[in-house]
Amino acid sequence: REYLGLALQQADRVFQKRAEAELRQSADFRRELIKMGKSFLSEIPFSHARAELEWMEGVVDLVVVCASGELWIVDWKTDRRLLGENEEAFSARLRGAYEAQIRAYAEVLERGLSRAASRLVLFSTELGTPFTIELAR
């Protein structure tokens, strides 16, 4: 019993430290959005003919129009880590699963607004961390 109690206390401390770090990272990203953003467009539905027989539909979580004129696309992801999965493996899995999707959002916005996105961000709610997807130039 004593061992179990100590183990639970230690787990609580580890969880609390992790939660505090994730909140700090999340707050830092939100501050960056507020500082850089001029306009914020959220939950933007779209339907787009990509090719003659290919159609895309979706909802972009957030487009930030920066004071500099840049466009940022932010997509929140609520995926959870698998049992035993470390942060590095989880972030790689997240990027692999959603990179094509956020690039498609960028394509739709570029065609619709005649402006290229300058930053693509997947934001993991599990880690409280933004992951920037490199732009193909």
Image: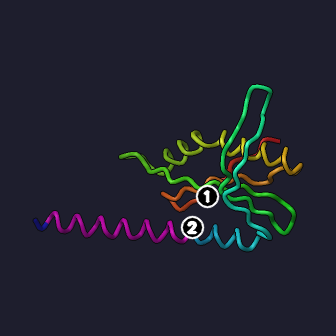
Circles 2 and 1: CB atoms closer than 8 Å: yes
- Magenta span covers which residues? 3-25
- 100 w.r.t. 14: above or below: above
Q: Position of residue 83 (x, y in %)?
A: 36, 46
- SS for callout 2: helix
- Verify whether residue 135 appears in magenta: no
Which residue has dot 2 on it?
25
Snapshot quadrant of residue 19: bottom left
Q: Quadrant of the N terminus?
A: bottom left
- SS for callout 1: strand
Crowding around mark 1 (Cα neighbors within 10 Å: few <14, some 14 to 19, many 20+) is many
Outermost residue toward the top? 53
The type of residue carrying mark 2 is Gln
Which residue has dot 1 on it?
130
Snapshot quadrant of residue 73: bottom right
Crowding around mark 2 (Cα neighbors within 10 Å: few <14, some 14 to 19, many 20+) is some
- 7 w.r.t. 46: above or below: below
Residue at 66 percent of width and 50 percent of height: 59
The type of residue carrying mark 1 is Pro
Q: Position of residue 51 (x, y in %)?
A: 79, 29
Q: Is residue 52 left or right of residue 11?
A: right
Q: Is residue 109 left or right of residue 9?
A: right
Outermost residue toward the right? 114
Residue 95's mark?
none
